[in-house]
Amino acid sequence: MIDKLRSFFSSFVFIKRTRFQSFSYVKKTPYPEKLSRVAAVQVKFQIFKSVKEFHNGILNIVRKAKDKGAQLICFPERMNLELQPIPYNMMSDSQRLKISNMYSKVFKDIVVNEGVYISEAQRLDGKSVRTLWTPEGSDLSEEKVMSCVGKKVAFFDSKSKSKEGVQLVINPRWAHVWINDYGSFKGAWLLSQQKYVFSVESYMVGDFSGMRLVGKSGIYAPIEITDSRNGILAFSKSETQGDVIIADLNFERLEKFVKTLENKGYDRLLLKKSRR
Amino acid sequence: MLKVYAGPTLISKEFLNFDFGITFDQAMPSSGLWFRFSERGVSLCDSLFEMGKRKWRVPIEISETIFEVKGIRAALLYNRELRMKELLEKLTRNRIELVLGYLKTSEYNPYALMASGWGCSQTTGIPTLLVNFIGDMTGYSLFSKMTGFSDGVRILFERYSLMNLSLKSGIFQNEKAKRDKGIEDD
């Protein structure tokens, strides 16, 4: 066990070197000047025994999305469970914390080298920790409404009150009870129809500790501004396989449409206390 | 079990013993309890006697949208209201058990029905009966909250249908009990 952990932590040297080298060069990749194309990554769950393997796995996906022109790449929930030098339930709290830090450094390293925005989510102490990384390597998720190349972005939160002016909502997902495609429409798709925003939803799929994870990732918009009038800009083909889906977001079209919906009468009604 | 007929009044004669009917027809049958939808609004009539109505305009009070019929509190919503999350959440705090919705579209689009009707049921947790008027045709749909066994689409754009709503059993009963016990109005 100790050997396993030692070799795991020593593999982290690779990342440190890569990062150091990346800072010593002039950046090859310019930062995105606008946000017009996003990617939803549907990850088929697998366990990586070393940071190097995990880094390469994530980098391959990011490059695939970047080659297709994506400026923002969204990963699903509980990505940190893929990085397990020893089974997760056998790790001590301090080991988990250390691995979590390494996990974050992998993403930080990749955004800096590749010049893209990445959203990812970890599961720590039973809570979801969502992060939006900038190409400079900073984490924007301290803010409830984040600015991503001038666009207002937020993570999905079904309980919270509406966040003013948000144009894009990111929803990292783990899995859901599968009946049919409707299950995948309950989150981000529905939010796009009710709040008139773009949304990106990424699922973790595959097998996890004997559990079958299913879900279809998608990139959505209000039905009124999609040519096919279905609110779907891109949708994963399979509910069990890994996939990278890409879609263009026309923020001008969205803003123009949202302006037609202004209705102050309802704002007044919703602020009122109702009588029994 | 609540039995609701939705469709043209003439065809309703084929069905017996429903609790109330919903129609887009302007001609009214001489007996029974009916919600009569039109492009201007909806009226609730009992044996030709008008018991209440709602015009399609922004309501001043939330109570304008709520009707009581056969011991059921139903909210009457139209078009954009069916997709207003805050309004739907406010209605659930007002002990609504059924949403009756009106949606006018230029063409048949199941995704528009989902966004308005199915989405309304997922947000409120209660059934939504939707009247979709598309010019020369009217279709009736019924949606409920998704469960482990059902996707929540019970009836999709039927010309007429007799619908059985189990408002007082299963998930609806639980939801109702929860609302009755704990959640206060605004």
Image (spheres, coloured by chain):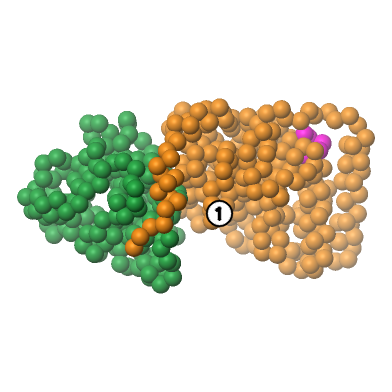
- Main SS, magenta region, reads helix
In the foreground, B13 or A275: A275
Q: Residues within 10 Å of mark 1 (few under 14, many from 20)?
A: few
Residue drawn at 91 percent across, 54 percent down: A10
SS under mark 1: loop
In which quadrant of the rendered image does the C terminus of chain A lie? bottom left
Answer above or below: position of A11 versus A250: below
User: Chain A is shown in which shade?
Assistant: orange
Subunit of label 1 = A
Residue drawn at 24 percent across, 59 percent down: B68
Q: Quadrant of residue B124?
A: bottom left
Q: Which residues are magenta?
A: A111-115
What residue is disc 1 on? A160
Expressed as whole percent of the image width and height from the top left, the position of residue A157 reads: 57, 52
In the foreground, B131 or A7: B131
In which quadrant of the rendered image does the N terminus of chain A lie? bottom right
Expressed as whole percent of the image width and height from the top left, the position of residue B54 reads: 25, 47
Q: Quadrant of residue A217?
A: top right
Expressed as whole percent of the image width and height from the top left, the position of residue A50 reads: 82, 53
Does residue A113 belong to the magenta stretch?
yes
Answer above or below: position of B114 versus B167: above
Expressed as whole percent of the image width and height from the top left, the position of residue B39 reads: 24, 37
Horizontal arrangement in the rendering, residue A102 relative to residue B109 (left or right): right
Residue drawn at 82 percent across, 42 percent down: A109
Task: State the green chain.
Answer: B
Residue furthest to the left in view is B30
- Can residue A113 be seen from the camera position used here? yes
Which amino acid type is marked by label 1?
A: Ser
Horizontal arrangement in the rendering, residue A214 relative to residue A121 (left or right): left
Does residue A242 belong to the magenta stretch?
no
- Can residue A60 be seen from the camera position used here? no
